[in-house]
Image (cartoon, rainbow, N blue to C red):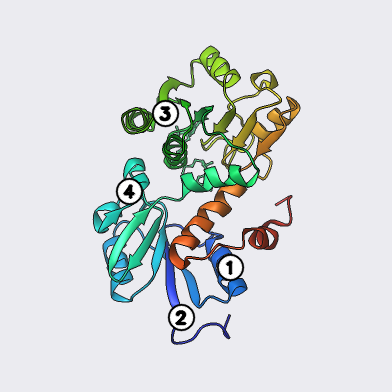
Amino acid sequence: MAERLDGHTILIGLMAYPIRHSMSPTMHNNAFAKLGLNYAYLAFDVTNKELPGAIDAIRTLGMRGSNISMPNKQKVIPLLDKLDPAAEMVGAVNTIVNDTGVLTGYTTDGTGFMQSLDDENLDIRGKKMTLAGAGGAGTAIAIQAALDGVKEISIFNLKDAHWEQAKKNVATINAQTKCKATLHSLDEQDKYRSEIADSAIYCDATSVGMKPLQDQSLITDPSFFRQDMIVFDTVYAPRETKLMQVAKKAGVKHVFNGLGMMLEQGAQAFKLWTGEDMPVDYIHELLFSDASK
Ligand code: NAD
């Protein structure tokens, strides 16, 4: 690291709170080193209160950009100069690029999700998806899948604080893409079963399956799934969620956790900042070779 950093090193940030646990600095700094790129990626504790000053610092210090995470993904929007169309539709930003003082906001969670399926040679374009969740991850996945040509998305959510966002996602998709989106309550169990039975992919983008809900799954009955479908859980800790165990019990061939999506959202941001492809296989091996983590 010390050999790499000099007076020309370009800084990229990660602005969120809490954020010190993030794997992103390790991921990006190892990728810069592998490719011999003179960049450094640092995490900064930034709450909503510090956000305007932190965004100004990107311009003042000539940083190349930053990742943005909670609680700043929505609050950052008025502080930027431009928004990528997908970020505008999602209503959230996780990546900022600074082009000589002009800050553009992007969202790479959705493109990361789609790319992680492409990496497995699985194509859901022209097909139907059933998606649980309409928080940050669920919104980004639904919008990007619709933009990329998924034919139909059946969204399920609790009637909780995210229900309004779910309604907004369906309205945005139906108004601005060729995809047909519908919304259902997770209480409608018969509908939940029949929509999944009719889908090429079931994706869980809820917090169920990760701490403190790591012992739970929205689906416990393996007969919800077909062997030839894709079951995708956005959770990556634990590596094998309860949902994934149920899908495997059903004999589902393509069962994924959120690791591929996490790596690919980082890779998409890396490309936006550097113009280079992140060495994804190398980073995967470096960070996640212990599959039991
Ligand atoms: P969020 O708080 O914005 O949204 C949470 C979602 O979960 C909402 O739709 C909410 O209604 C639903 N939910 C919460 N508790 C529930 C319950 N008991 N039963 C049913 N639904 C419930 O969170 P987020 O940022 O969208 O994260 C959601 C999941 O996506 C998390 O598991 C997170 O780890 C994962 N995620 C993965 C990646 C990745 O790169 N793999 C990126 C972002 C988020």
Q: Earlier in the sequence, mark 4 or mark 1?
A: 1
Around disc 3, counting alpha carbons within 10 Å, would you say few (fewer than 14), some (14 to 19), or many (20 or more)? many
Residue 42 is situated, as x and y percent measured from the top left of the image, at 47, 70
Around disc 2, counting alpha carbons within 10 Å, would you say few (fewer than 14), some (14 to 19), or many (20 or more)? few
Q: Secondary structure at mark 4?
A: loop
Q: Amino acid at mark 3?
A: Cys
In the image, residue 34 sits, relative to residue 283, either above or below, namely below
Q: Secondary structure at mark 3?
A: loop
Residue at the spot of label 4: 74
Q: Is residue 236 visible?
A: no
Select label 4 or label 1 by which is in front.
1
* Residue in the image at 73% along x and 51% along y: 291
Residue at the spot of label 3: 179
Q: Amino acid at mark 4?
A: Gln
- Tell me the number on the disc at residue 9: 2
Q: Which one is in front, 14 or 110?
A: 110
Q: Amino acid at mark 1?
A: Ala
Marks 2 and 4, how far apart in space? 29 Å
